[in-house]
Each structure stands twice: as structure tokens, then as C-alpha cells.
Amino acid sequence: MSALKILVIPGSLRTGSLNARLAATAGYELSQAGVDVTRISLADFPLPIYDGDLQTKSGVPKNAVNLKRMMSAHHAVLIVTPEYNSSVPPLVKNAIDWVSRVQDANENRGQVFRERPFAIAAASEGRLGGTRALAALRLILSACHATVIPDQLALSFASQAYDDMDRLRHPADIEALAALVRQLIEFSQRMT
Ligand SMILES: Cc1cc2nc3c(=O)[nH]c(=O)nc-3n(C[C@H](O)[C@H](O)[C@H](O)COP(=O)(O)O)c2cc1C
């Protein structure tokens, strides 16, 4: 079987983003496990805030179609989200909302969510590590009928979580990421 292709999406555009850093770490661990990893930035898929009138007038924006096709070209998707006021940031929710409206030729709407597993992770300076954003994201993806793998990673005190070689320093974080990588690969193989 050829290498699994997994798409990694950081949910922050911020310079120095803790979630972009965790997405890079997770991407590295996936590639060490033999996965062909694509890590994107949502900055390359700018989207207006979802508005039904806009969709009626102009259709789904090309960037939403492109993002959906990027997801379709991979066996699985890992989203690494910040936590804003106990939930996901608008950047993440808006991207999912638009992608859920894409209707590609010979496909049902939302098929991209149903056909591949999703994994979720978060990084935050807080003690809970974005756990509430993960609960919200799991709910949103489940509403899209996605299979969200049970293992997840909430990286607490995220700016302190790395050593000077830029590796996770705490055994619990290392093991949580390793478990997520193992499980995502297992689900990807099962659903392919
Ligand atoms: C509007 C807003 C709300 C936030 N709410 C939370 C929160 O509920 N829980 C939390 O742990 N951090 C919260 N934070 C702090 C973010 O976790 C922190 O800014 C983090 O660095 C953002 O992710 P990033 O570094 O990937 O951009 C909030 C930040 C912003 C801007």
C-alpha cells in the first residue's frame, strides 16, 4: 500500500502561533511514522464569514472548494485548534461551515467529512490546554458526520511544553501525541 496522506491544518494564522507549532510537531511525528504529511495554512484559503445570501448570489467561494478538494486528496485530516472563549475560533468554524456547503461533481454535500477520519488537537497557555475547544470541535465535526478519533491532545502551558531542541518535554504530552498518531494511522488504514 502506498503511503498514507494526512493533511494537517493549524487553526491560527498568528505569527508565533502555539497551535501552528504543535501542528508542526504533530506533522513531524506523523512523517516519522511513514505518513506523507501536507501542512497548510488557512491564510492560503481566505474566506468571508459565511452568509447564505452570499452563497445564493455567488455560490460557495473558490477557496472553500479548494480547501475541500485539499481535504479530499488526503486519507485523514488533523486540525490543531486554539481555544477562544471556551470554543473554537471563528477561523476554524467558518472554514468548516463553508467546506460543509461545497457540492462537488458526483459527490454528495459533506461527503469529504464522512469518508476520512479526523483527529483534533489544541495548544493553550492555560492548564486545560484547549480541552473545551476540542469538545466544541468534536461536536462540530460530528455534526458533519465525521469520524473523529477518540484520542486527542490538549497541550497545556504550551509555550513551556518544549525543550531547547523544540521537542515536547513532558512524557504525558509525548505519549498523548504518539497515541494520537498511532490511532489516526489505524483509522486511516481502516477507512481507506
Ligand atoms: C478572543 C480570545 C479568547 C481566548 N479564550 C481562551 C480560552 O477560553 N481558553 C484558553 O485556554 N485560552 C484562551 N485564549 C488564549 C489563547 O489560547 C492564546 O491566545 C493562544 O496562544 C492562541 O492560539 P495561537 O497561539 O495558536 O494563536 C483566548 C485568546 C483570545 C484572543
Image (tube, rainbow, N blue to C red):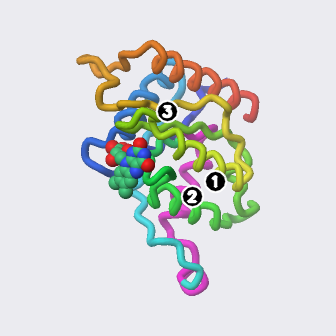
Q: Main secondary structure of the magenta part?
A: helix
Gap between marks 3 and 2, in whole Å? 20 Å
Region in magenta: 54-78
Residue highlighted by disc 1: 140
Which mark sits nearer the N-terminus, 2 or 1? 2
User: Does mark 1's beta carbon lie closer than 8 Å to ligand 1?
Assistant: no
Q: Is residue 40 left or right of residue 108?
A: left
Residue 67's disc number: none
SS type, badge 2: helix
Crowd class of label 2 (few under 14; some 14 to 19; many from 20; radius 10 Å): many
Q: Residue 188: percent from the left, percent from the top?
A: 68, 31
Image quarter where the C terminus lies is top right
Q: Residue 81: percent from the left, percent from the top?
A: 47, 45
Residue contact between numbered discs 2 and 1, judged by CB atoms under 8 Å:
yes
Gap between marks 1 and 3, in whole Å? 17 Å
Residue highlighted by disc 3: 154
Q: Residue 54: percent from the left, percent from the top?
A: 53, 82
Q: Amino acid at mark 2?
A: Ile
Q: Nearer the viewer, mark 2 or mark 1?
A: 1
Q: Is residue 62 magenta?
A: yes
Residue 96's disc number: 2
SS type, badge 1: helix
Q: Is residue 59 left or right of residue 29?
A: right
Q: Amino acid at mark 1?
A: Ile
Q: Nearer the viewer, mark 3 or mark 2?
A: 3
Crowd class of label 3 (few under 14; some 14 to 19; many from 20; radius 10 Å): many
Q: Is residue 60 left or right of residue 160?
A: right
Task: Name the image quarter holding residue 111.
Answer: bottom right
Residue contact between numbered discs 1 and 3, judged by CB atoms under 8 Å:
no
Give 29 or 106, whichever is nearer the viewer.
29
Residue at 37 percent of width and 20 percent of height: 168
Q: Is residue 191 magenta?
A: no
